Image (cartoon, rainbow, N blue to C red):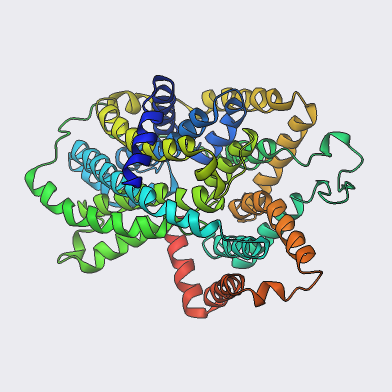
Amino acid sequence: MELFSNLALGFSTASSLENLFFCLIGVLLGTLIGVLPGIGATATIAMLLPITFQLEPVSSLIMLAGIYYGAQYGGSTTAILINMPGESSSAVTAIDGYQMARKGKAGAALAIAALGSFFAGTVSTFLVAIFAPPLTEIALQFGAAEYFSLMVVGLVSSIALAHGSIVKALAMVALGLLLGLVGTDIYTGTPRFTLGIREYADGLNFVAVAVGVFGIAEILRNLENEKSRSVLMSKVSGLLPSKEDFRAMVAPVLRGTAIGSVLGILPGGGAILAAFASYTVEKKISKNPKEFGQGAVAGVAGPESANNAGAQTSFIPLLTLGIPANPVMALMIGAMIIQGIVPGPNVAAEQPALFWGIIASMWIGNLMLVVLNLPLIGLWVKLLTIPYYVLFPIIMAFCSIGVYSVNSNVYDLYSVAFFGLIGYVLAKLRCEPAPLLLGFVLGPLLEENLRRAMILSRGDPSTFVTRPLSAALLFIAALVLVIVFLPSVKAKREAVFQEED
């Protein structure tokens, strides 16, 4: 009964006119940036962080969440129509979705993607509602040592699931942790690595770093590699799948939802990994595997369900433990901190309306996406014809105005420019920026809990291995590192991410 009363609180919060409006804005923006290749949910949320400072906490987080899972929907539109995934998690959808479009079944492919995503979103929303409260209760028993070990697990998992070299991902985490040290020491009040600049006494601006590494760097990459977009068709018809399509999509949707719900919780790239895992499973169990790559319904339904389920279950570690499962969740933590909310298990107890309002808004947002997206496909198709050279000056101006408006600090603009160049260089070196952002967000929390645990244990480092839960978490972190360095696992991992590229 407690679950139903909590959900009732969540739906009453999420269904207020103000929150419905921001949920609608979020899902529309998410779909838009998912449709337009080369922007991405992470960059968009980074750019919109300054705006959230002016909004109510619940409204701002509902809007940002809507952008995230809305982008999963929008990404499939470009994947199907022009064979160019708007989101990396939609890369698998392009394989069979584009072939369906070439056979005149673009409308059916888009509907299959939307319906599969809606079902997966509904199921994963209830999974979040069911599993978040007990996990929160467990997390309330955590001490400083357990939190330190948990963050180590999160960082190690993000390394394992990052693209490219594991050594490079490890270096990115280390760089993020170092950037998190800039500012004033929390215990002694001594400035650290501020280069004598007073504006950096509170540390590097999270918004500036995020906008630079993801927003500006992404713009520079797209200007260098802008691709011409040839839209397959200007008008999409036949949005209702046939009976055969419905029969063919049911089982893949169910399997994709299950795979995505589990893998989405993993730190790193759970939604992306879920889409690839779902496609692999469908191809292996298919009676006719040769149809994959030729327009198989299962090749669209499974991965689309998996990436949407993964996107939403990634909220579980965020809401219960304050640990981001991916860069977008790290940005959500940044938005919570901007609003004066301390991420972690206390959120459910101290701000139940916010906690359950976000969960309820996921289902409302998914319903909005199905109702709005299919009728608006014609508009999204027209937007695909906008040249990138028209979009990028507007995006850069929006980034600069937004970042400056947070603190009215010109050094934040210097930081955006600097980290934009850093992000571009990292991309050229094939270094994944996501572990850097996770390291930057978790760094101060990692340090705080490390030092607090050492103070409580009177300087005895064995406290991390003598406390059972802390020791178990550190063992898991070590095990993950050992596994990813095994030759067979390393080769399989590289094959998966090479396919995505």
User: Measured from the top left, where is residue 58 in percent x and y?
Assistant: 50, 31
Horizontally, residue 114 falls left or right of residue 337, namely left
Q: Is residue 103 above or below residue 163?
A: above
Horizontally, residue 227 falls left or right of residue 415, namely left
Residue located at (43% from left, 21% from top): 18
Horizontally, residue 152 falls left or right of residue 100, namely right
Q: Farthest residue toward the right?
A: 196
Q: Farthest residue toward the left?
A: 243
User: Measured from the top left, where is residue 456 in percent x and y?
Assistant: 76, 64
Q: Is residue 205 visible?
A: yes
Q: Is residue 4 above or below residue 11?
A: below
Residue nearer the viewer, 255 or 126? 126
Residue located at (28% from left, 65% from top): 281
How many numbered marks does the figure carry?
A: 0
User: Measured from the top left, where is residue 320 in percent x and y?
Assistant: 50, 51
Q: Farthest residue toward the top?
A: 17
Q: Is residue 325 visible?
A: no
Residue nearer the viewer, 424 or 229? 424
Q: Farthest residue toward the front?
A: 1
Q: Quadrant of residue 485?
A: bottom right
Residue located at (59% from left, 51% from top): 434
Residue nearer the viewer, 327 or 3? 3
User: Measured from the top left, where is residue 231 in percent x and y?
Assistant: 33, 33
Q: Quadrant of residue 27?
A: top left
Residue located at (26% from left, 56% from top): 293
Horizontally, residue 31 falls left or right of residue 453, namely left
